Structure formats: C-alpha cells, structure tokens
C-alpha cells in the first residue's frame, strides 16, 4: 500500500526551505532532506512531513494492567500499537529495537482499528498508543481519535512535548501513563538527551485537565534510586494528588547500558519511601506479584486483585471500598 506524504503539524518555515519543528522541546531545525531527532518528521522540499503516519511497528491485544494502568477499567483488554520512533535517546531503553533502531513497519487502516478495538472490549472500546513513543505519532493519534470518537484513547508516553501540542491533544485522551525517568535534570540530559521541566509541566497539565493519570519510574540502581530523589519524585506527584498511582519498575540491561538489573530489595526500598507521600505505589518487572495489589489506604482491605493475566475489582458502587466505603481513585466499570 502507498501513502501520500502527510504534512506535519506544529512547524515554522524559514528561508532557503529550512524549517523548525515545534512538536517537542528539541525544536529541530532541518534543512531539506533532513529528519528530526525522533526520525519521524522530515523536511521534504521545505515542507515538514510526518513520515511515520499510519506506519505501525507493533500491534497486540493486551491486558490493561500491562500498560501499566492499575486504576483504569481493571481486568479489561485493550488494543495496543506504536510507531517506530522516539524523541528521547535513553541509554537504558528497554524497547530500543522498535523505538530507537529502524524497524519494519506495516500500514494501518482506521476502519480495521475501530473493528479490532470493538472486538477487544465491546463494553468499553479502547485503544492504547504505546510500546515506543506515541507522541511522535501525533498526527495519527489525533486523526484516529477524530475518526473514532467512541474509542477511549490511552497514551503510554514520556510526555516530552511542547506545551501547545500537548494541551491541544489532551481533549482526545482518556488516560495516560507517563514515564517520569528521574527527578533530576542531569539524568535527563546525560542518559536520555532530554530535559525534565517539560515532562513535569505536562504531568501537571494532564492532571489539571481531569485525565486519568498514572506515573511510571524505571528504577536504575546508582543512577536514579537515591532516597532523596525518590522522596522528591513522590512528593511532586503528591502535590497534585496523593492518590495518583506510581509504578516503580525494575530495569534490565539493554541498549547501551550494562549495569546490573535492579534488585527486588531496591524496588522495595523505593516503594516504602514513596508510600510516605502516596497512597498507591506498585512494583513492576518483578518475579513476584506481591506488589501488584491495591489496598484501601484507610482500612487496608484488598480492593483490586491482580496477576500477570489481569485484574479483578472488589469495589462497590463503582469505586468504593467494600469494607469502609472510602472512594478509591480511578475509573472503574
């Protein structure tokens, strides 16, 4: 199948057919024939094109818990897909083969996506843009949401986007899991070739816009697991709401990083520190399922039970603890 080039949003034309992409904080200035840091936007004869439009590197039906989203329709299935691009360059990227390296893609069709999403969860059709960095697929996400308004759109993202495009996209989005790499700008610069401030701003914007929000931290011992940094990260989230779930996941050696995998002890320590600020803190990428369960922060009753196969809610009246009646943060059936 052949697709005509799709003109990108958010760019500025300069002299001599040069241009500046204003989608993300890299603000790449491109000469004719050059592509941006994300590899998804190219200057073709003085016009910026989204060259990854409708080109998918991975598609699958997942448990919603795999995103991870633990407080958003637990136990449901979600159609998940992603592009072959990313606007960060993390030395430890866990999905580098599809996000950083050029990989084979296939074309997608909006009609088939709509049918697939309805098949996955007829009662609540939902679609996750994930796996790599979905915000580099900006135009495709927007077009898909406009074409299929009955779909609930989920983003699993690094949130490294300029303010205007991020705010413009939020009305189309139902839920986000934002990857907060560290509470340290030097970490972002040295390990990810990015900056911390835009990510924090967009986390605030997403919460203030009333979107369901969960945060993920990939913990790397010796780089972003200092007690003070974990406390600062959890404290930042708590200032928005102590109910926002935080997922602290174990890193495994990948791409350019060969540091040992994160130990369970380090995850447990980080969870305990974060719980001083937050009501819902989980552990991921571990061999145990002990850190996947949701307990009521008031009476400690088990309110959502999870395994690697999915989740089961015991909440009553959609979102209340069955034992004490406390309202649990989230979006539930």
Image (cartoon, grey):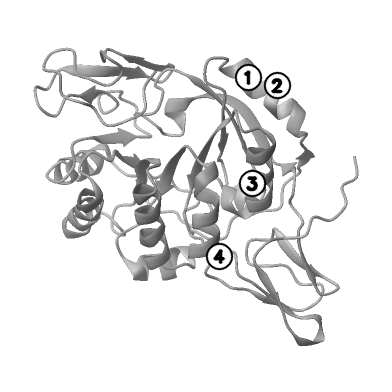
Q: Which mark is residue 24?
A: 4
Let me know if residue 163 appears in the view: yes
Which quadrant, please, contains the N terminus? Answer: top right
The residue that disc 1 covers is 118
Please identify, in this view, whether the residue under mark 4 or under mark 1 is nearer the observer: 1
Which residue, given by chain and number where applicable, does mark 2 sit on?
115
Which type of secondary structure does the marked residue at label 3 adopt? helix
142 in relation to 69, above or below: below
Distance (Cα) linking label 3 and label 1: 19 Å
Mark 3 → mark 2, Cα distance in angstroms? 18 Å
In the figure, 153 relative to 15: above or below? Answer: above
Alpha carbon of mark 4 to alpha carbon of mark 3: how far?
16 Å
Which residue matches tag 3?
142
Q: Is residue 255 left or right of residue 276?
A: right
Q: Secondary structure at mark 1?
A: helix
Q: Could you say where residue 219 lies in the image, as x and y percent from the top left?
A: 33, 48
Q: Earlier in the sequence, mark 4 or mark 1?
A: 4
């Amino acid at each position: 199948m052949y697709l005509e080039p799709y003109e990108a949003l958010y760019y500025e034309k300069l002299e001599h057919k040069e241009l500046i992409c204003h989608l993300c904080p890299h603000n790449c200035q491109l000469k004719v024939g050059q592509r941006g840091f994300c590899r998804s936007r190219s200057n073709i004869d003085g016009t910026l094109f989204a060259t990854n439009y409708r080109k998918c590197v991975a598609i699958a039906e997942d448990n919603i818990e795999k995103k991870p989203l633990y407080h958003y329709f637990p136990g449901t299935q979600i159609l998940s897909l992603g592009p072959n691009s990313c606007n960060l360059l993390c030395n430890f990227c866990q999905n580098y083969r599809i996000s950083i390296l050029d990989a084979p893609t296939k074309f997608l069709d909006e009609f088939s996506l709509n049918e697939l999403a309805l098949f996955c969860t007829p009662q609540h059709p939902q679609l996750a843009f994930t796996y790599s960095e979905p915000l580099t697929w900006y135009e495709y996400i927007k077009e898909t949401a406009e074409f299929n308004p009955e779909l609930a759109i989920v983003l699993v993202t690094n949130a490294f986007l300029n303010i205007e495009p991020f705010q413009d996209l939020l009305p189309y989005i139902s839920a986000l899991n934002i990857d907060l790499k560290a509470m340290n700008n030097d970490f972002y610069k040295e390990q990810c070739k990015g900056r911390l401030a835009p990510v924090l701003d967009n986390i605030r914007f997403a919460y203030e816009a009333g979107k369901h929000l969960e945060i993920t931290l990939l913990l790397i011992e010796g780089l972003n697991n200092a007690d003070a940094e974990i406390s600062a990260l959890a404290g930042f989230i708590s200032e928005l709401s102590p109910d926002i779930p935080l997922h602290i996941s174990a890193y495994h050696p990948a791409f350019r990083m060969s540091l040992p995998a994160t130990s369970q002890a380090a995850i447990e320590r980080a969870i305990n520190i974060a719980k001083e600020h937050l009501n819902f803190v989980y552990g991921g990428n571990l061999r145990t399922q002990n850190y996947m369960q949701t307990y009521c922060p008031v009476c400690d009753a088990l309110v959502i039970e999870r395994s690697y196969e999915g989740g089961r809610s015991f909440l009553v009246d959609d979102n209340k603890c069955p034992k004490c009646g406390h309202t649990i943060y989230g979006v539930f059936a």
